[in-house]
Amino acid sequence: MEELDSRKTIILNAIIKNYLETGEPVGSRTISKYTDLNLSSATIRNEMSDLEELGYILSPHTSAGRIPSDKGYRFYVDQLIREKDAEISEMRSLVIENTEKMDQVLKKVAKLLATDTNYATMITGPKMNGTKIKFIQLSRVDSMNLLAVIVTEGNLVRNRMVSVQEPVDDEEILKLNILLNTSLNGLTAAEINLGTITQLKEQAGIHSDIISKILDAVAEVISEDEDLTVYTSGATNILKYPELADSEKASELLGAFEDKEELISLVNESLNNEENTGIQVYIGGETPVQKMKDCSVVTATYELGDGIKGTIGIIGPKRMDYEKVMDSLRNLKQQFNETLDKAKDKA
C-alpha cells in the first residue's frame, strides 16, 4: 500500500470520519471546514483526485462527493491499530520504567477513555487498607545522602532521600538493609509498634537516627498508598447532551467532578458491590452521587494483585451506548491488568 503524505492522510481521514458520521458522500467544501489545513477547495479537490486515482476513495455516480473504498478503510483501520498499539505501549513503558509514574498512566487512561467514548471518565489510583511493606533498599547517593527505595504490596515503588550526619560505608549500608528487611517485611504501619522501633534502633547502634528517618519515610509512603486519588477527564463531554446541558444540571454535574468525597463514595460503592462480571451499572437515582441522578454511571475494577484495587468509571446520559461503554471498560480493564502484571514481573 502506497505511503501517503501528511496532507493526503489528513484529507483521507477527514473523508472517512465524515462519511462514518453522516453516511453521505463528502465534498471538498466539507473537508475545508472539517480540517485545519487552511487549503482552498480547489487544492483539496486536487488531493481528492489523487486519492481517487490511488484507489483510496470512490466517486458515486449520483454525487460530486467521495466515499471511502475498501482500500481507504483498510488504511484508516491500520492507522488506528498502530495508534492504539502505540498508546498501550506508551502506558506499558511508563509503568515498567518507573512505578512512580503511575499517576501519569492513570491520567492518560482517563483521557483516552473520555476521547474514545465522548463521555466523562474517572479512574482511581490503586488502594489497599493495611498496605504491607514488601522490600526496602538503601543505597548511597553521595557522602551525605542515601536513597531509600520502599516497595509495598502490588510492587508499588516509592523513593525517599535520607540525609546522614556522617558518611556511611558499603558494609554499614548492607547491615542496615538486612536489619530493615528482616524486621519490617510483611508488616503494616499499624504493626510497626514501639517495641519494633526500639529494637531496630538498638540494633542499628550509632545509625539509629537513620532508622528513625526511614521509619518516617515508610509511614509517609504507606499513608500515600492508602489515600485514594481520583483522576477525571472529559467532564464537559456530558454537557454536549441537551438533557444535561441546562445551567442547573450542568452546575451540579461539574460540581460533582470537583468534589473528591462525592467521587470516593461512588468508588467505594463500586468496590463493595462488584458483580461477577466486574462491571457495575448505576442508572439515574441508583448512583450514590445524587448530583449525578440524571446520568448513568458504569464502573469496572482493575487489580494489581495482593488485594490492591482501583476503579475505572464512565459517566454519561441515561441514553448512553451501554454496549460500547461496557465493551470499552472490559477491554481497557484487560489491557490495564496485563500492563500492570508485566510491570510487576519486571519489578
Image: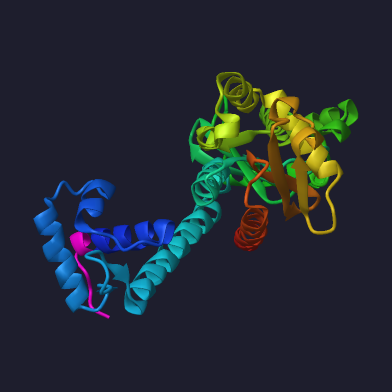
Which residue is found at the position 29% from the left and 60% from the top?
A: 26
Confirm whether the magenta stretch covers residue 6: yes
Whether residue 215 is visible: no
Q: Nearer the viewer, residue 17 or 308?
A: 17
Residue 114 image position (x, y, % from top left): 53, 45
Residue 22 image position (x, y, % from top left): 40, 57
236 is higher (above) or lower (below) than 336: above
Q: Nearer the viewer, residue 138 or 299?
A: 299
206 is higher (above) or lower (below) than 103: above
Tell me the colour scheme of the image. rainbow
Which residue is found at the position 23% from the left and 73% from the top?
A: 3
Q: Quadrant of residue 193?
A: top right
Left or right: 186 in relation to 36: right
Q: Nearer the viewer, residue 73 or 299?
A: 73
The quadrant of the picture occupied by the C terminus is: bottom right
Chain part drawn in magenta = 1-8
Count of labels shown?
0
Residue 206 image position (x, y, % from top left): 70, 28
The quadrant of the picture occupied by the N terminus is: bottom left
Residue 84 image position (x, y, % from top left): 46, 61
Q: Main secondary structure of the magenta part?
A: loop
Q: Nearer the viewer, residue 175 or 38?
A: 38
Which residue is found at the position 52% from the left and 45% from the top?
A: 118
Confirm whether the magenta stretch covers residue 208: no
Whether residue 271 is visible: yes
Left or right: 301 in relation to 112: right
Which residue is found at the position 72% from the left and 50% from the top?
A: 300
